[in-house]
């Protein structure tokens, strides 16, 4: 816990990745586990629907909180940031370069079959006015589909079917060629994106995200966002793909099923390609008079120096249309503050981002102790959901709550979600996963 008398500010770049959760889900359903270093709380939380109001433009911020049932003197504070939505009709035409890992490791555990299924879903969801090109990389990289109108969908799908695992993995060469293609396709009034699909195992050429992105840093900063898609329960490099997405101003997902491919590339594609805000970061301030300590759950590798919050030369995160990102805090109140809640805010959250014209925009929300839900029954159902997710990730990494929340308590609270969020299949599956790992 950080004492706000020493440091009242918590600052971080926004993140809408979800890959850590789907990677965990894939492992759990196959009777396996993932390394604690691959558990990123914010990506677990961001996978699930929230209940924030959608702004008309850019980003907006909301705050709510509830008493922690297993630590009544503490609060779970939820800082939610939502982005404006965009309709498919309003979205610009899209040019995609698909960079596909065709290395030998893609022959394992159905990785190539999963890749092809995801690409078929992606191509089928694109408008006929879009264009697609494709690079296949192994020891070397080569273009297997020149820029092709999506109206020639059969030809694009035929190129997908011809993909096959080959030799070593030179992800750097594949991305360099993919970005070259993307730069050649750039056209005024259209969006250009690079989509990397891989198990993340790079063993030829540059093999770390810094080295790979340094070769294409100029292109990566010209509005050609990188989407990294992970596949494969075995021999999977989570770190490489997550960091490539962060440095490529994009987002990272993990595809573990046809249903997840449909979620990401089918129904979710419209907003997932449109940038709603660039260089977005949040700063949360705690009142030292009311708060004795706070702890941000997750965002470990997205921290920004407090003094750089308004330094737009420092890279923030990109938030895409129709998405929400959530930060959870455990907050300890000073003696007396919990007994007599104040009407004065004890937490203030500000989101800062650049709009389409490159102008800095800030929006702020506050919360007072009098507005905190005194029990989970009074709290938002989605806040209760987020608490279950946070306790789950805490258990997976052996965090400080592990000794405070029993397996039966976690299962009971998870099961209670079905009564308040009935009909949400993601929540239903979360309850099942909690049953598996908390037994």
Image (tube, rainbow, N blue to C red):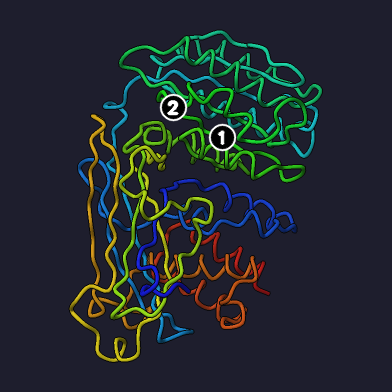
409 and 172: which one is in front? 172
Residue 228: image tag: 1
Viewed as shown, does residue 245 lie left or right of 294?
Answer: right
Question: Looking at the picture, does residue 188 appear above or below residue 25?
Answer: above
Residue 296 placement (x, y as % from top left): 45, 65
Residue 211 sits above or below residue 368 on the image: above
Counting every numbered tag in the picture gives 2
The answer to whether residue 374 is above or below residue 124 is below
Q: Secondary structure at mark 1?
A: strand
Label 2 with label 1: CB-CB less than 8 Å: no
Q: Quadrant of residue 87?
A: top left
Label of residue 221 in the image? 2
Residue 35 located left or right of residue 257: right
Circle 2 — which element? Answer: loop
Q: Nearer the viewer, mark 2 or mark 1?
A: 2
> Residue drawn 32% across and 70% down?
286
Which residue appears at 47% of the width and 58% of the height?
45
Picture coordinates of residue 14 (x, y %)? 41, 48
Mark 2 to mark 1: distance in Å? 16 Å
The picture places residue 32, in percent across and down from the top left corner, at 74, 57
Q: Say which quadrant the C terminus sits in.
A: bottom right
Left or right for 117, reference 189:
right
**Quadrant of the image occupied by residue 105:** top right
Residues 309 and 236: in front is: 309
Query: Left or right: where does residue 322 sit relative to residue 267?
Result: left
Question: Around disc 2, counting alpha carbons within 10 Å, would you say few (fewer than 14), some (14 to 19), or many (20 or more)?
Answer: few
The tag on residue 136 is none
Give the mark, 2 or 1, whose residue is nearer the N terminus: 2
Residue 171, position as x, y percentages in the image? 67, 26
Which quadrant would residue 294 be assigned to in this image?
bottom left
Please give the name of the residue rendered at 25% of the width and 54% of the height, measured from the top-left corner.
53
């Amino acid at each position: 816990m950080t004492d706000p008398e020493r440091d009242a500010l918590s600052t971080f770049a926004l993140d809408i990745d979800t890959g850590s959760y789907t990677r965990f889900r894939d492992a759990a359903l196959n009777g396996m586990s993932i390394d604690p270093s691959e558990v990123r709380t914010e990506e677990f939380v961001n996978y699930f629907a929230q209940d924030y109001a959608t702004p008309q433009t850019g980003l907006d911020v909301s705050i709510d909180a509830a008493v922690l049932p297993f630590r009544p003197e503490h609060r779970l504070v939820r800082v939610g940031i939502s982005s404006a939505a965009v309709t498919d009709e309003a979205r610009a035409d899209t040019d995609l370069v698909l960079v596909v890992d065709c290395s030998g490791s893609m022959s394992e555990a159905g990785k190539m079959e999963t890749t092809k299924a995801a690409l078929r879903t992606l191509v089928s969801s694109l408008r006929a006015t879009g264009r697609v090109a494709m690079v296949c990389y192994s020891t070397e990289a080569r273009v297997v589909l020149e820029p092709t109108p999506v109206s020639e969908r059969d030809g694009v799908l035929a190129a997908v079917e011809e993909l096959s695992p080959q030799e070593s993995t030179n992800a750097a060469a594949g991305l360099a060629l993919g970005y070259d293609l993307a730069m050649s396709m750039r056209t005024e009034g259209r969006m250009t994106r690079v989509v990397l699909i891989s198990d993340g195992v790079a063993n030829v050429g540059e093999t770390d995200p810094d080295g790979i992105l340094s070769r294409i840093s100029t292109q990566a900063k010209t509005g050609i966002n990188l989407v990294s898609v992970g596949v494969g329960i075995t021999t999977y490099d989570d770190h490489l793909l997550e960091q490539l997405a962060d440095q490529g101003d994009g987002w990272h997902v993990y595809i573990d099923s046809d249903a997840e491919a449909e979620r990401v590339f089918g129904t979710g594609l419209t907003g997932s390609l449109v940038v709603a805000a660039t260089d977005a970061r949040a700063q949360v301030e705690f009142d030292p008079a009311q708060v004795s300590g706070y702890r941000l759950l997750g965002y470990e590798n997205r921290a920004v120096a407090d003094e750089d919050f308004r330094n737009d030369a420092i890279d923030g995160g990109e938030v895409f249309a129709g998405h929400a990102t959530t930060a959870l805090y455990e907050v300890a109140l000073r003696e007396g503050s919990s007994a007599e809640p104040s009407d004065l805010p004890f937490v203030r959250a500000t989101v800062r981002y650049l709009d389409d014209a490159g102008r800095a925009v800030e929006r702020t929300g506050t919360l007072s102790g009098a507005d905190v839900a005194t029990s989970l029954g009074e709290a938002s159902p989605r806040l209760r959901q987020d608490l279950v997710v946070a306790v789950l990730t805490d258990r997976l990494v052996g965090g400080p709550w592990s000794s405070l929340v029993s397996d039966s308590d976690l299962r009971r609270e998870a099961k209670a979600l079905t009564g308040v969020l009935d009909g949400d299949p993601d929540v239903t599956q979360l309850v099942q996963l909690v049953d598996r790992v908390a037994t």
